[in-house]
């Protein structure tokens, strides 16, 4: 015979329900478990009793077990371990006497912790123990929530980086300061550097800058692998914009030295007049690179050639307008009269209109592959 023995060392079952122990039999233990759960739902001994019922049912339906199965619950007393062990020993004796069938009896002991397992020598002196099952409640209110929260945090790569990286930086402050002191580096410098790095990291996470950087890196890698002309023209355009910025600033300084009082309009005109040629060159360069890539990808359309002409037209307008506001004889600057301003505005406008008409006619007379694949307009 195999006995499933539930152990309650401090007699929660008897004290809280008033039941007489030991309790023998599946139905009797089930009623006792319900009574204890009703009296104190948080008592872990409730789980011990239900685990005993579960183990009994499992063994009873197991075809490999060809012996009788019994289940019982024994309790001690609330107090000293010695008295509790003595009482449990007496209850185990009564259980074994009630199950005496002439067969050898082995037992499976079910407890709710290490304290109850101190009774094992007492039980083993009376009946052989096949196994010991400790019932652990998964939904312990505080410990389980903390454990599973930490487990989920560490399993998520994004959350793990957000929490653990700043924590790691903070933990490295002391060793960094210690190492810096060996090289006569002030600790305030190390703290400032670490604080700055931590601030930049936090700011980048908050603003999503890292996503933008990842997107830029991915697009740059794709451009390099695809051999696109746009990459080269963009680099050249950036260089031209930088040079244009310096040229505009240089002309602004010359005008400032020549004019004792410089207004906002005069300063803006000087900067634009000195830089617009370089900015126009950057726009034409980048647009030609884009047109080239569209042609190589069989997506070219005639209207795309408007871009460099539009850039040229806008630059002409800005150049003559800014020059009109410059004083006569401005160093390194071209001053325009009202007539010259009118001519420049007309030339820029005609250039834009002329390019639009020419490429519209070309697109209608000589349709490209991209144009022919467009769906018809309803």
Image (tube, helix red, strand yellow):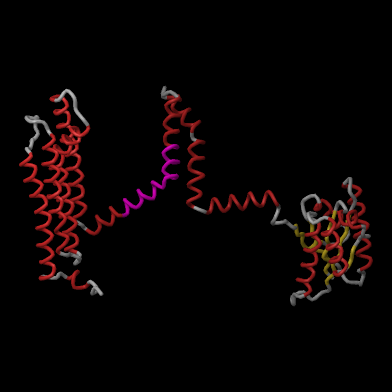
Picture coordinates of residue 53, whole percent (x, y): 80, 67
Decide whether residue 331 is among the magenta residues: no
Residue 4 or 161: which is nearer the viewer? 161
Provide the residue span drawn in magenta: 198-218
Q: Is residue 173 visible?
A: yes
**Quadrant of the image containing the C terminus:** bottom left
| Most common SS among magenta residues | helix
Q: Quadrant of residue 344?
A: top left
196 vs 31, left or right, is: left
Residue 161, compared with residue 32, is above or below; it is: above
Task: State whether residue 258 is above or below residue 168.
Answer: above
Position of residue 45 in the picture relative to residue 200 (left or right): right
The quarter in which the N terminus is drawn is: bottom right
Find residue 194 and report its horizontal and vertical position in percent: 44, 33
Q: Residue at x 19, y 69 (%)?
A: 370
Q: Position of residue 148 (x, y in %)?
A: 61, 53
The relative height of residue 113 versus residue 103 in the rendered view (above or below) is: above
| Total labels drawn | 0
Please state the horizontal and vertical placement of residue 125, each as a whole percent of the image.
87, 57
Q: Nearer the viewer, residue 214 or 312?
A: 312
Q: Residue at x 51, y 53 (%)?
A: 156
Residue at 92%, 69% in the rendered image: 100
């Amino acid at each position: 015979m195999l006995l499933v023995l539930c152990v309650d060392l401090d007699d929660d079952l008897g004290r809280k329900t008033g039941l007489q122990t030991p309790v023998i039999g599946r139905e009797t233990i089930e009623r006792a478990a319900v009574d204890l759960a009703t009296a104190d739902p948080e008592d872990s001994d409730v789980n011990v009793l239900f685990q005993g019922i579960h183990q009994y049912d499992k063994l009873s339906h197991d075809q490999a077990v060809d012996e009788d199965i019994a289940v019982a619950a024994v309790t001690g007393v609330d107090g000293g371990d010695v008295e509790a062990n003595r009482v449990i020993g007496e209850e185990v004796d009564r259980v074994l006497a009630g199950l005496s069938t002439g067969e050898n009896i082995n037992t499976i002991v079910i407890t709710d912790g290490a304290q109850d397992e101190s009774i094992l020598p007492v039980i083993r002196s009376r009946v052989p123990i096949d196994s010991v099952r400790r019932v652990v409640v998964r939904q312990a209110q505080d410990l389980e929530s903390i454990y599973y929260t930490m487990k989920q945090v560490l399993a998520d790569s994004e959350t793990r980086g957000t929490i653990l990286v700043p924590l790691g930086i903070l933990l490295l402050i002391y060793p960094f300061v210690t190492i810096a002191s060996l090289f006569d580096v002030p600790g305030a410098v190390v703290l400032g550097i670490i604080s700055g790095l931590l601030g930049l990291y936090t700011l980048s996470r908050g603003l999503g800058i890292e996503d933008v950087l990842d997107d830029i890196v991915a697009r740059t890698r794709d451009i390099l692998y695809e051999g696109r002309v746009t990459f080269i023209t963009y680099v050249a355009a950036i260089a031209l914009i930088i040079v244009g910025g310096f040229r505009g600033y240089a002309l602004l300084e010359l005008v400032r030295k020549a004019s004792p009082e410089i207004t906002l309009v005069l300063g803006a005109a000087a900067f634009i007049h000195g830089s617009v040629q370089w900015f126009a060159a950057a726009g034409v360069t980048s647009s030609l690179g884009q047109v080239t890539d569209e042609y190589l990808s069989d997506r070219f359309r005639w209207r795309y050639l408007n871009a460099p002409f539009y850039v040229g037209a806008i630059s002409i307008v800005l150049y003559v307008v800014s020059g009109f506001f410059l004083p006569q004889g401005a160093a390194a600057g071209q001053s325009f009269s009202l007539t010259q301003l009118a001519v420049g505005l007309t030339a820029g406008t005609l250039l834009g209109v002329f390019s639009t008409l020419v490429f519209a006619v070309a697109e209608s007379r000589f349709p490209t592959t991209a144009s022919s694949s467009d769906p018809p307009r309803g």
